[in-house]
Image (cartoon, rainbow, N blue to C red):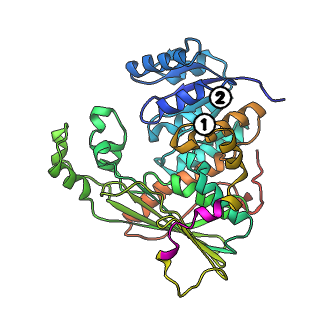
Amino acid sequence: MSKEKIKLAFIGYGQRGPALLKSLAEMPDVEIVAVCDKYEDRTRQMIHDVKEAGGCTPYAVQDYREIIANLTLDAAVVCTSWSMHIPITVAFMEAGVAVGFEVGGCDSIEQCWELVRTHRKTGVHCMMLENCCYGKREMMLLNMAEQGFFGEIVHVEGSYTHFLAGQILAGKEKRHYRLANYLHRNCDNYPTHAFGPLCKLLGINHGNRLVSLTSTASKAVGLKSYMRDNEIENKDLINERFMQGDVVTTTIKCAYGETITLKLDTTLPAFGSRTLAVAGTRARFDERTCSFFELGKDDPEGLWRSNWGNEREYEEQYMHPLWKQYEKEGVQLGHGGMDWLVLRAFVESVKSGTRPPIDAYDAATWMSITPLSEMSIAMGGMPVEIPDFTYGQWIEENVKGD
């Protein structure tokens, strides 16, 4: 039986917290009863935001464990630093609380296994809030793939290309966790924005699986160059050595021979992009030119440039039904509407008590790319096996074991 309204705790108020908290506070079937951040000023702002949206004064603490000990909840949303996503999620799941948690890589493969084992032991669901799986373009590509537009998909590509030098170097002042990661790790630290939608395209964990990867990192000079040319507040960083390569390229092999190329590119000048590309036996898509090529329709000898931007010609026929309905009802703000859709998917799964569309198995698989890429880079680009977090059940269309 579906619940009319859920009681929710919101944990973390850093980079992503404010927008998500505001969206959830405005949902009539969500009551934010508790908020938490380790910084008191952020907790006070969270109280203000909830009350401003028409909610009651929430229970507010600096330690999420107090919420678990003292309140009865239906759900929690975790927007803390990357390294704390899984530990906090596991703690709430063990208390019987469904969790939606923000994206990012994890620290170790053992954390990924812990997430899956906790779900299997408790039967409690968690959902990675990978909003890009709900992007208008990403969902259209998924709809096209399901209709056979691409034929048999052979290769896909994606990236997190986003110039973040200023944000990274202001980590101390903004109390942001990216800085520590760039100082001490060398990996694809933020893979899921492109990787999640690509996994959905290829049916990963649902009839297909990832087998192995190789990763290579470039030298790390982008942040040093930025500091030479721009004024930064934390002058001590000028003498620091950054571990994180400017560009990390990862190639992944799937069970049925498909390949995936991922790229992390956040410290060199660039426009923001996920550079999605899909190559199949019948058609191809490239986000960099916003264009499709169809066998039998387009001339292989013709110039690609003349077809740049033809993506719009396909929208009427292939727009995903969810987005058609969304645009009809009115797109909500937040990353072009993606934030609202991913949060609604989580809320609806909690209300109905059903498995979310991005579950513990998906989250563990996608987050594992970070420590696995780190291993491969450290070994000079050697291949690394990707664990099967579904315990062999990927071969089924729907993973069992819940």
Tell me residue 272's x, y (percent): 41, 54
Q: Residue at x 27, y 43 (%)?
A: 169
The quadrant holding residue 153 is bottom right
Judged from the image, the secondary structure of the residue bearing numbered disc 1 is strand
Q: Residue at x 41, y 22 (%)?
A: 42
In front here: 278 or 240? 278
Within the magenta stretch, is there residue 133? no
Q: Residues within 10 Å of mark 2 (few under 14, many from 20)?
A: many
Q: Which residues are magenta?
A: 306-315
The quadrant holding residue 72 is top right
Instruction: Say left or right for 396 vs 15.
Output: right
On the question of residue 388 being in view, the answer is no
On the question of residue 234 being in view, the answer is yes
Tell me residue 232's x, y (percent): 19, 41
Kind of residue at badge 2: Ala
**Which residue, given by chain and number where applicable, does mark 1 sit on?**
100
Residue 75's label in the rendered image is 2
- Magenta-highlighted stretch: main secondary structure? helix
Q: CA distance from mark 2 to mark 1?
A: 8 Å
Tell me residue 340's x, y (percent): 60, 38
Kind of residue at badge 1: Gly
Within the magenta stretch, is there residue 310? yes
Residue 186 in the image: above or below residue 171: below
- Residue placed farthest to the bottom in the image? 301
- Residue placed farthest to the top in the image? 57
